[in-house]
Amino acid sequence: MPLGELPVVWSLPREDARAGWRALCWSVGPGSELAVLLVQERHLRRSPYVKGWVGWSVAAPCDGVLVVVSGGVEHRTPVTGIAPWTGHLALLPRSRFLLVSGRTRRGRDGAWERNAVVHSPDGSPVGHFCIGDDIDYVITDRDGGIWTAYGDEGIYGGHPESGAGLARWDSDGSPVWSPQGRLPVWPLGGSAGATEGAMAWLAWFSHKGAFVSRVDPATGDITSFPNPLRDTDGIAVRGTRMLLTHGFHNRPGVELSRAELVDGAWVITAQEKLRLPGPVVMHCAQGRDGVLWLRAGDTWVRIEV
């Protein structure tokens, strides 16, 4: 698919880049609004071992700017109190948003350090809590539920919610859902997430293969399917159709697979390679209501199921 056919939602303006702003993390809200957190480069440090923007981290508490793009209109909010190691952004109801560090640890009193911060519509911190350790993926639903998938250090690290592999939290940081042994095997890590209406879809892998799980937050029911694509990085679902991507290796392209739900199993029906305006790495995809959003360098595009 030529680049010109992919609708560009937003790109970091050149004047922002020249002024030292860098896009630290991003998310898409349940209303299909794109949110990007900008931080001055002087506040960031880069890992020598991780390629692309995911290798940046906040070195010390700092301020920034939240850019929200909805319906082609851009709105900017100053953000205060961005914590060190912030790596995940998610939108909450009533114009609030969540900033999360992927790691936490126990304090001397045995309590887990708070690694999630709720910010008010004016950008200031108004709540702190812990949502588990070694967080691979964060996505919020339209009711304000916070869905998390964990890596192996979180699953085997002693945190009670991380140990289940997947979890849902309310916007006050209380755990409200876990698989409770209803997954086909024990997870080793999360790889992608999406919402479809009220449903949440979470892709994860184990020592016995990869799976995609659909969860109904109203009932807690979970249905898991073998993942038809190895090493999935992104998913988007609409009814019996799914988009999947894999192979983000800091190159300006991605392999896209289309799948159909046939007799209770997802079957790949088509595959293509997409050329993108910039390199893609980990955490470059998110699915919302049948639309797959991709970050390609400092440009965001979207693909319909």
Image (cartoon, rainbow, N blue to C red):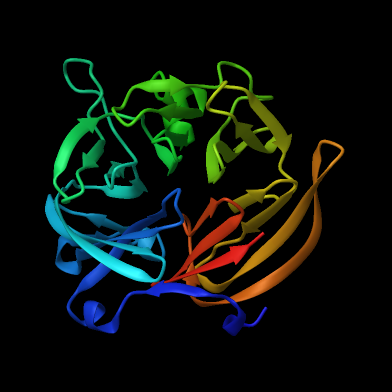
- Image position of 183 with respect to 229: above or below: above
- The quarter holding residue 101 reads top left
Would residue 266 be found to the left or right of residue 19 on screen?
right
Q: Position of residue 166 (x, y in %)?
A: 50, 30
- The quarter holding residue 26 reads bottom left
- Image position of 104 with respect to 73: above or below: above
- Image position of 240 with respect to 168: above or below: below
Residue drawn at x 59%, y 40% as measured from the top left: 201
Q: Position of residue 302 (x, y in %)?
A: 54, 66
Q: Nearer the viewer, residue 105 or 162?
A: 162
Q: Position of residue 164 (x, y in %)?
A: 50, 23
Would residue 217 be found to the left or right of residue 2 on screen?
left
Q: Position of residue 51 (x, y in %)?
A: 41, 64
Residue drawn at x 28%, y 47% as measured from the top left: 95
The C terminus is located in which quarter?
bottom right
Would residue 202 be found to the left or right of residue 99 on screen?
right
- The quarter holding residue 158 reads top left
Residue 111 showing in the rendered view: yes
Residue drawn at x 48%, y 72% as measured from the top left: 279
